Image (tube, grey):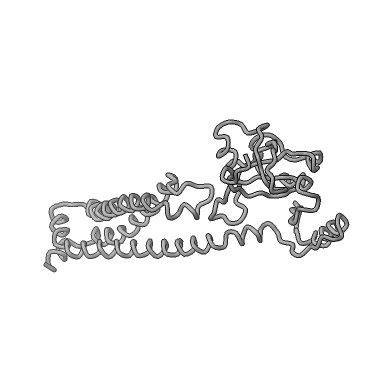
């Protein structure tokens, strides 16, 4: 059982009772730590869903024991008392490894180096009070930095946010180019088919049918382009998977919404050439030819 090759690496975190309530972590099964668990002789731990799934599959891990090596070089048996939802601790772009939590008392009182405090209102108002409370608890502890959760989340999101902003900017440019390109193509088509449109109108074609002819051609071209784009996007979703949190890269709602947006843009881009074609004077159109 002491063979290092049989152990697998996982991230561990030392916490105090109340930590999961302060962080509003989602409890999936079992319970969180109480003050009674915060003692050296208690061997209860909490694991996340990633570790529970890897170690026990679909079985409930509550009450089961595993070997961990935290306090010393020798592994020791601990009992799983709770399971929380896996959360990303360092970066939103990286799911991270399996995670387990032990109490401050289990490792040795004073092992916790970071503190989480849930406040009401502006968190900066509590800086002095928090510093005083920690010094009262242990004068040897030095408070080096106080950050709000919003600032930590913004820092974790910075890389992903910048990438998504660039992608969004390029997407807007692509939409504008597509709209201008479609408008240019249909305008050219209307000019090239001026005589045909004139003949159609001379033979009794209504302006609305001419309008529908041009707009329909634009929508058909757009529909073909959207279909090709959706197929290509489905093939490239793996590139985006690391930037998306809580949403599938191939989310049907997103694809449907974007397809509808492009169809609306195509309809607007087709509307001006169609209106110009419907307003043509058939005699003037035939005279130009």
Quadrant for the N terminus in the image: top right
Q: Looking at the picture, tell me which residue is in the foreground, 7 or 274.
A: 7
Q: Can you see residue 229?
A: yes
x and y percentages locating residue 236 in the rendered image: 38, 53
Identify the residue shown where x is 53% and y is 47%.
Answer: 246
Q: How many marks?
A: 0
Left or right of 188? Residue 37 is: right
Identify the residue shown where x is 54% and y is 62%.
Answer: 159
Identify the residue shown where x is 74% and y is 62%.
Answer: 146
x and y percentages locating residue 263 in the rendered image: 35, 52
x and y percentages locating residue 39 in the rendered image: 81, 42
x and y percentages locating residue 158 in the rendered image: 57, 62
26 lies above or below 64: below
Q: Looking at the picture, tell me which residue is in the foreground, 216 or 110.
A: 110
Quadrant for the C terminus in the image: bottom left
99 lies above or below 170: above
Left or right of 189? Residue 113 is: right
Q: Looking at the picture, tell me which residue is in the foreground, 245 or 186.
A: 245
Identify the residue shown where x is 70% and y is 38%.
Answer: 78
Q: Can you see residue 207?
A: no
Q: Looking at the picture, tell me which residue is in the foreground, 289 or 269.
A: 269
């Amino acid at each position: 059982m002491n063979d290092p090759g049989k152990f697998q690496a996982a991230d561990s975190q030392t916490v105090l009772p109340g930590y999961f309530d302060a962080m509003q972590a989602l409890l999936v099964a079992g319970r969180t730590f109480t003050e009674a668990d915060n003692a050296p002789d208690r061997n209860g731990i909490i694991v996340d869903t990633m570790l529970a799934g890897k170690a026990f599959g679909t079985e409930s891990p509550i009450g089961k024991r595993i070997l961990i090596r935290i306090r010393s070089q020798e592994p020791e048996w601990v009992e799983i008392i709770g399971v929380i939802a896996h959360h990303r601790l360092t970066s939103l772009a990286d799911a991270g490894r399996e995670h387990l939590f032990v109490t401050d008392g289990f490792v040795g009182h004073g092992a916790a180096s970071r503190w989480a405090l849930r406040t009401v209102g502006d968190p900066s108002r509590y800086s002095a009070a928090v510093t005083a409370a920690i010094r009262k608890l242990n004068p040897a502890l030095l408070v080096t930095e106080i950050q709000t959760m919003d600032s930590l989340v913004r820092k974790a999101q910075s890389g992903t946010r910048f990438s998504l902003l660039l992608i969004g900017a390029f997407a807007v440019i692509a939409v504008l180019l597509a709209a201008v390109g479609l408008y240019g193509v249909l305008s050219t088509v209307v000019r090239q088919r001026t005589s045909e449109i004139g003949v159609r109108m001379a033979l009794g074609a209504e302006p609305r049918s001419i309008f529908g002819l041009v707009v329909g051609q634009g929508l058909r071209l757009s529909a073909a382009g959207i279909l090709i784009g959706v197929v290509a996007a489905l093939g490239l979703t793996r590139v985006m998977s690391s930037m998306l949190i809580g949403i599938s890269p191939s989310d049907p709602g997103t694809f449907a919404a974007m397809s509808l947006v492009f169809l609306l843009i195509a309809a607007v881009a087709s509307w001006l050439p169609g209106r110009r074609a419907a307003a043509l004077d058939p005699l003037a159109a035939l005279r130009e030819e």
